[in-house]
Amino acid sequence: METSEMKVDGNAIGGLLREIFTMEMTTAETTCAGCGAVHAVGHVDVYVNAPGVVVRCPSCEQVLMRIVQGRGRYWVDLRGTRCLEFIAAP
Amino acid sequence: MWQVAEVAELIPETPRVASLVLKVPDWPGHDAGQHVDVRLTAEDGYQAQRSYSIASPPEESRLAITVERLEDGEVSPYLVGEVKVGDRIELRGPIGGYFVWKAGDAHPLLLIAGGSGVVPLMAMLRHRSAAAAKPPARMLYSSRKLEDVIYKEELDRLAAAGDGLAVTHVLTRAQPPGWKGYARRIDREMVSDVAWPEEPAPLVFICGPTSFVETAGGLLVDLGYDPSWIKTERFGATGG
């Protein structure tokens, strides 16, 4: 299998992100801490075959987020995301 | 977040694809293009979970998903072939707001589907069909063979309605005798034949395997489409 075929996109983790952030997140926008590109979460590259979920910037491939779930907890590493912008719950 | 849904009806679509109509108590409604996550739990507690696009339009009270059976998958071989009417599965949703189309948007619509990537686009066409105002729409739908084409008859019917929808089929691997349509993988000429002109700005939804989606999106940008007109959903090569 080619690496590119292990890649999906941010739509695939909409359910997971909604559990963490308690709102629809595929329309949220991430600013990459590496290159500064801004992308909708639905458009970012996602690798779900890794242990946990790895989210990468589609412009520069830097890691934006890592999310691991287990033993009733989440670990969310947002080091690669300079800013995550989303609409507040009404 | 997870809730129990009961399988109300099973509709075979192709030899490897079936639609599941689900009874979900208190379904909040959904938009065309959204998906649900389905979770199966084995007797030993092992859980497997996959995302499936919603095929039914927002207008329909019954929720339907369409699933392709992948032999090495963990979830789809159960959903296509084993599950029976009355069985219960766990799901959460509706999920997604990015890959969503709402009737009322007047931009010419371009839908590009690879294989079972047609499912969320079908929800959009069903939604469009039920809407009062219908923007012109074109669909380019790539399948391997004619018998793999999902929703074939319904697409023929929708396209024959004369309300501004054109559906172009592509058969990449095998074609029936006398086939006059495209018989190759998606390429620049094909996309340029089917795509709307750049004015007025169209709205594009592409769904399919990752490499298909990236190829189609790249070809449109090469043609002069602004990347902001294009929404994509890539489901990898495996699904499951």
Image: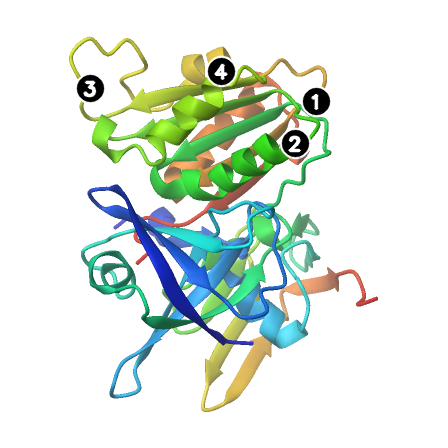
Q: In which quadrant of the rendered view does residue B215 lie?
A: top left
User: Where is residue A14, by image quadrant?
Assistant: bottom right
Give the distance between the C-alpha atoms of the residues marked 1 and 3, in whole angstroms: 34 Å
Q: Which residue is mark 1?
A: B201
Return the residue at label 4.
Answer: B194
Q: For marks 2 and 3, give the CA distance.
A: 32 Å
* Chain ID of residue with mark 3: B
Alpha carbons under labels 1 and 4: distance apart: 15 Å
Q: Residue at x 27, y 81 (%)?
A: B42
Q: Is residue B143 above or below residue B223?
A: below
Q: Where in the figure is residue B38, as x and y percent of width and height?
A: 41, 66
Q: Amino acid at mark 4?
A: Val
Identify the secondary structure beneath mark 2: helix
Q: Secondary structure at mark 4?
A: helix
Q: Secondary structure at mark 3?
A: loop
* Chain of the residue on which disc 2 is drawn: B
